[in-house]
Amino acid sequence: TLLAQRSRNPKYPPRFPVEDAKVSWKVPWPEYSPVPFVAPSVLAAERSDANPNGWADSPRPNLAELKHRLSCEGPLFFDADQRPVNPRGRTGVCGRGMLGKWGPNRAADPIVTRWKPGDKRKLQIVAIQRGDTGVWALPGGMVDAGEVVSVTVRREFAEEAGNMASDAERAAFNAAVVYRGYVDDPRNTDNAWMETTAFHFHCTADLAVQLPLRAGDDAHNVTWLDVDDAEPRYAALYASHKDWVDRVACELSASGLAAAAACEQAA
Ligand code: RP5
Ligand code: MG
Ligand code: MG
């Protein structure tokens, strides 16, 4: 499934085909020849998180930069060209693709839940429709340079999905970390990949009413979405977002999941 996600980015040139058995770097494969790709927008440094100098050009990044680039997945490994190597294996593309940074690209994801009005066993999450792929997703975003992830998650929620006016409103949103690590994002390459911290915020019925949803920034639509495998937008949630929400739903004993399977994985 990792590979299925990675190979489905329409903005990439065709990836060098990698069958499941050859994803792991441990499998020797001398013929492997990933397609080099860097999006023009990244080269033009249109993204605020772009780093056109790249990893190889800054052998001695300062301490703040180093911390930002540490992977949640363990020590980083480098290829013969001194580029960081994707800890989950081959993707069929090398270079930064559409990602601004070599190695881990840090994000934060808010999982905002409420019990569905009128159905107390069914969970809902705030989901946005991504502007880039049209796929429904958590309203997450990139960590800005020097930003603390707990701030990012509130900022991105406010920018993409919410209408929270004040810092006080954002602060009142109490969060718990439910996942930290690699994201199976379709933009990932052999040398650049997404990592995130996912936070869970549960809204009481009162708070949910006071939380007016509004699509903003790179989101086309926003909605309270049923956490239900029978809901196609939920079943096809972006990247690995469904894995983390399923886990939250299991912990809250919500109905609507292919429950046994999801809860077993969570255990
Ligand atoms: C995903 O991309 C993360 O889980 C997060 O939801 C998102 C961040 O990237 P942008 O929304 O800023 O494109 O990998
Ligand atoms: Mg954003
Ligand atoms: Mg986003």
Image: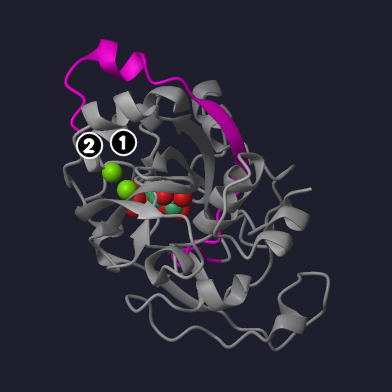
Let me know if residue 111 appears in the view.
yes
* Residue of label 1: 157
Please say if the residues under marks 1 and 2 sit with CB atoms less than 8 Å apart.
Answer: yes
> Can you say which quadrant of the picture contains the N terminus?
bottom right
Is the CB–ligand 2 distance for label 2 below 8 Å?
yes
Judge from the rendering whether residue 27 lies leftward or rightward of residue 217; answer left or right.
right
Q: Residue at x 30, y 32 (%)?
A: 208
> Camera-side residue: 73 or 54?
73
Residue 184 part of the magenta-drawn span: yes
Is the CB–ligand 2 distance for label 1 below 8 Å?
no
Q: Secondary structure at mark 1?
A: helix
The segment highlighted magenta reads 162-189
Residue 25's place in the image compared with 99, above or below, is below
Judge from the rendering whether residue 248 lies leftward or rightward of residue 154; answer left or right.
right
Q: Residue at x 31, y 19 (%)?
A: 170
Q: Secondary structure at mark 2?
A: helix
Locate residue 23, reporting x and y percent.
71, 75
> Camera-side residue: 124 or 157?
124
> Camera-side residue: 213 or 257?
257
Q: Residue at x 68, y 62 (%)?
A: 80
Q: Residues within 10 Å of mark 2 (few under 14, many from 20)?
A: many
Q: Residue at x 39, y 49 (%)?
A: 138
Let me know if residue 148 appears in the view.
no
The coloring applied to the image is one colour
Q: CA distance from mark 1 to mark 2?
A: 5 Å
Residue 185's place in the image compared with 55, above or below, is below
**Which labelled disc corresponds to residue 159?**
2
Q: Amino acid at mark 2?
A: Glu
